Amino acid sequence: MGAAWVELGLDRRLGFVSQKTEFRFGTVEMTGITIRAATVGDAVSIGALNAEVQGLHAAALPDLFKSPDAVGLAATAPGLIADQRNLVLLAEIGAEAAGYAYAEFIRRSETPHRHAEDIVYLHHLAVSGACRRRGVGTALMAALRARAEERGVTRIALDVWTFNDSARVFFRRQGFMPYNERLWNR
């Protein structure tokens, strides 16, 4: 079984987004979703949320992705949260962890071939299966955009595997479009 992934990007300066999303960091009143910065105390919740996505990846590409291990995944969360380059957001509905986003602020230096740039790279976006289609992913993306804009960063990039149709559709609806394609010889 072959697979590839497509890198998607969003840059307000280039007009990739059709409308500006207004979001105040905190509670999204219309949906009852709270988005906040994750703390080390959220590691178990983040591990459990990540395990759902890891399971999807392991089922699609078992020779590449390991089976989910929520405890092992939770053990990595404190390091991600503590790293000042990273932004880890937790979405909650009531007292329930509904989703999380893990992104990294990256400064790419100028080279002879490229201009310098600041980007936010979204490594993970996970929403609990029980909370999907309730605006959690959209709220996390709005919070990520708001945090990026606070730091003057207009470009957000991410990878999405070609087997993950729901993620591909979601990110396109969020205004992302392909800008690079990676291929392999499986």
Image: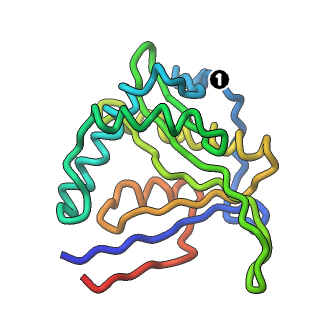
Question: Residue 145 is drawn in which quadrant?
Answer: top right
Q: Is residue 48 above or below residue 161?
A: above
For this view, does 69 lie left or right of residue 137?
Answer: left
Image point 72% across, 46% down: which residue? 148
Which quadrant of the figure contains the N terminus? Answer: bottom left
Q: Is residue 63 visible?
A: yes
Q: Is residue 140 left or right of residue 150?
A: left
Disc 1 marks a residue whose amino acid type is Gly
Residue 160, above or below 135: below
Which residue shows up at 72% across the image and 66% down it? 108
The quarter holding residue 140 reads top right
Quarter occupied by residue 128: top left
Question: Where is residue 73 shown, x and y percent of the image?
Answer: 34, 38
Which residue is pictured at 48% across the width and 40% down the height?
137
Q: Position of residue 103 (x, y in %)?
A: 57, 47
Determine whether the residue tagged by mark 1 lies in a helix, strand or loop.
Answer: loop
Residue 57 appears at what percent x and percent y? 27, 55
Q: Which residue is located at x 77 percent, y 46 percent?
A: 149
Q: Nearer the viewer, residue 45 or 164?
A: 45
Residue where numbered disc 1 is placed: 26
Q: Residue furthest top?
A: 95
